[in-house]
Amino acid sequence: MGEKKSLKIEKLEINVEKVLIDRGEEKETEIVLGERELLKIILLPSVNHPLKNLKVYLKGDGSRAEVLGIIPGKGHTYFDITVSVIHQGVNTSAYTHVRGVLFDESKAQFRGLIRIDKGANKTSSLLENRMLILGQGARADSIPSLEIEADDVKASHAATIGRIDEQQLFYLQSRGIERKTATRMVVDGFFEPIISEIGNESVAALIRGDLWVDILKVKSKEAIV
């Protein structure tokens, strides 16, 4: 039966040759990877495209996938994001890491699935979801799941939902930084583990800029200039 380990094990080393940026224009996307194909998917839902159902099939032996997602919630936006990674080939691996920050009365539901089909031995797959709540009326639900039908595999998931650390804000404010600016700094730090994994600094810089443009499109009680 599958072996479940904590996310303390090293992140999968994936030598990505193809990068796909998915801004959620299509509500449903299916991707099938062939033998030894390598793909990094950057998932960027927005207030205009808050619904996404992404399925990644690692069909070919030795295929690799990395899914990185950023959810910026504000106003009354409701995000419904599903990421399913289905391992079908032998010696496949995947790493899914999605983070969200929810301002105002925004809400988000994230469902993540790792499925390892029968015969997909020597599979390694990790799923991580972190949500940060800033708005008083904001809410997040995280539903990770594993379905394992093969032997000799490693699969693990982790999920956390929490509010902004007031001690962090207090420390920054004690250094003369205004609360709104301090909040932005904390949010930037929260998203940085995702952005730093992109591996291309020019793409990462664009996403950093787009992230705050998107957040500030709707005036937020917490969003900052």
Image (cartoon, rainbow, N blue to C red):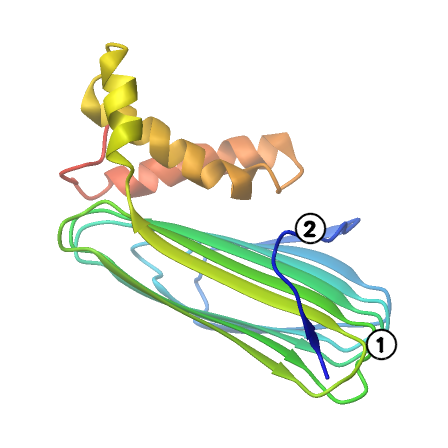
Q: Is residue 10 left or right of residue 92?
A: left
Q: Nearer the viewer, residue 52 or 177?
A: 177
- Residue, x 52% and y 30% (percent of image)? 205
Q: Is residue 107 left or right of residue 221?
A: right
Horizontal and vertical percent for residue 111? 44, 71
Does residue 128 lie above or below 55 as drawn?
A: above
Q: On the image, which quarter does residue 76 sit in?
A: bottom left
- Residue, x 61% and y 60% (percent of image)? 6
Q: Nearer the viewer, residue 72 or 110?
A: 110
Query: The N terminus is located in which quarter?
Result: bottom right
- Residue, x 70% and y 61% (percent of image)? 65
Q: Nearer the viewer, residue 91 or 216?
A: 91
Using the numbered discs, state the Cα–Cα distance from disc 2 to disc 1 in whole angstroms: 19 Å
Horizontal and vertical percent for residue 98? 49, 55
Does residue 32 lie above or below 207 as drawn?
A: below
Horizontal and vertical percent for residue 144? 48, 71
Looking at the image, can residue 181 be seen? no
Q: Dot 1 corresponds to which residue? A: 90
Badge 2 crowding class, 10 Å Cα cut-off, few under 14, some 14 to 19, many 20 or more, is few
Q: Is residue 111 left or right of residue 167?
A: right
Q: On the image, which quarter does residue 96 sit in?
A: bottom right
Q: Secondary structure at mark 1?
A: loop
Query: The C terminus is located in which quarter?
Result: top left
Horizontal and vertical percent for residue 215? 29, 41
Q: Amino acid at mark 1?
A: Val
Q: Amino acid at mark 2?
A: Lys
Marking on residue 11: 2
